Amino acid sequence: MSEVLALETDESLLLLTSDGAPTELASQIAQRSRDSGRQTDVSTLPPSVSFYVEPPAEIADKMRSANVILELASNSTYYSSAMRDAVRGGARTFFLSGIGPEEFETFMLQVSNSRVHALGQRLMALLKRSRRIEVLSGFGCGLWASLGPAWARELLQLPIFRRYLNAFFDEPTGLCRRPSTQSSLAGQVSFSGLRATINGRLNIDGAVFPPEQDCPLEESFKIDVKAGRVVNVEPTSAGKRLSKWMEENRRTGGREVMHFSLGVNPAARFGRSILINERVFGALTIGIGYGGKRSHTDLVVTSPSVWLDQKPLFKKGELVHPDIAFLRSSFVRPSPGVQRTTRKAE
């Protein structure tokens, strides 16, 4: 609450959970918040077959009046109009969709979120100084893109340029201290090159989400990108599902490359959570689809080699750039743990 959210005692906290999601963690966080004198509410989202949901009106009203929204639901309100209204009204929102007590202890309590965020800032500063990115993802697959001229960095943040050129550099995840901020689990740096310059082939071997059955992937497949569009997908089982998804979302940019992300969370390990998979140290995520409910999907490459302006940044998942030196152990700290109730053997 202090390090990540900078939650003041006079601010209100709303926790969002859902049926089937771990409620023990939400209860503990809510109790700790109430013990500190904060106005705290826990709301449960109704069951949904979709990962992205629109909350009912009574929960939407609570979201608009809350200072801080912490989401632990297995489904997510990230793209909902209610969340958009809350953020515009000044709320800061932190997403831990589907995270349970064990994941919370490993990836939140045992990692210095401030240090991981600071590493992300250094990486983002390096990206902003660079003009070209190159990625090798194994099996002879390579992808290249221009990051745009340095003088245009601030100009490209304007909505009209971000929409049509799709060149941007987002704040690293991990801290959510300013009004009208949306963030999530520490360890992700998201950006994009000039869309027309994104070309090549990637071997997708980590995860695709959605759909849920391909997180993590059982077999890898290759995609071909031309001028920022996915033009071909290898017809494996997962590849066919992705092709079907792109066809169903063709009107909302189902083939358009919207962002790249680099993972820098030393504690993250591949599993069934896309939130964690995207943050595995050295992983590359390519996001396609304009966004909105069910119209964006993320494809994860596990350990690519990445170059910026012909200087190595990552080599097979290890950070090797001379301008960013760090000690992984400095990111890990002892954790008080999440208290769990145990059932006595009968």
Image (spheres, rainbow, N blue to C red):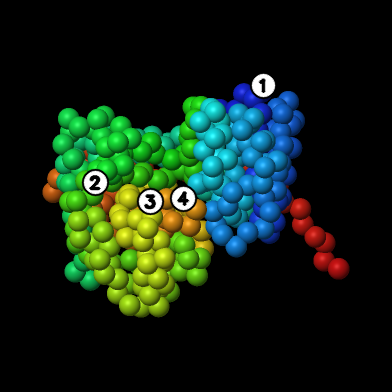
Q: Which mark is residue 198?
A: none
In the depicted view, which residue is nearer to us: 136 or 50? 50
Q: Amino acid at mark 2?
A: Gly
Q: Which mark is residue 193?
A: 2
Instruction: Determine whether, in the image, residue 41 is placed left or right of residue 230.
Output: right
Q: CA distance from mark 1 to mark 4?
A: 33 Å
Q: CA distance from mark 3 to mark 1?
A: 37 Å
Image: 280 above or below 245? above
Q: CA distance from mark 4 to mark 3?
A: 7 Å
Q: CA distance from mark 2 to mark 4?
A: 21 Å
Q: Secondary structure at mark 2?
A: loop
Determine which residue is flagged by label 3.
290
Mark 3 or 2, nearer chain start:
2
Is disc 3 surrounded by few (<14), some (14 to 19) or many (20+) residues within 10 Å? many
Q: Amino acid at mark 1?
A: Asp
Q: Check whether the beta carbons of the residues at disc 2 and disc 4 lie within 8 A of each other.
A: no
In this view of the protein, can residue 101 be seen by the observer? no
Q: Secondary structure at mark 3?
A: loop
In the depicted view, which residue is nearer to us: 176 or 145? 145
Front tag of 1 and 4:
4
In this view of the protein, can residue 35 be seen by the observer? yes
Mark 3 or 1, nearer chain start:
1
Q: Check whether the beta carbons of the residues at disc 4 and disc 3 lie within 8 A of each other.
A: yes
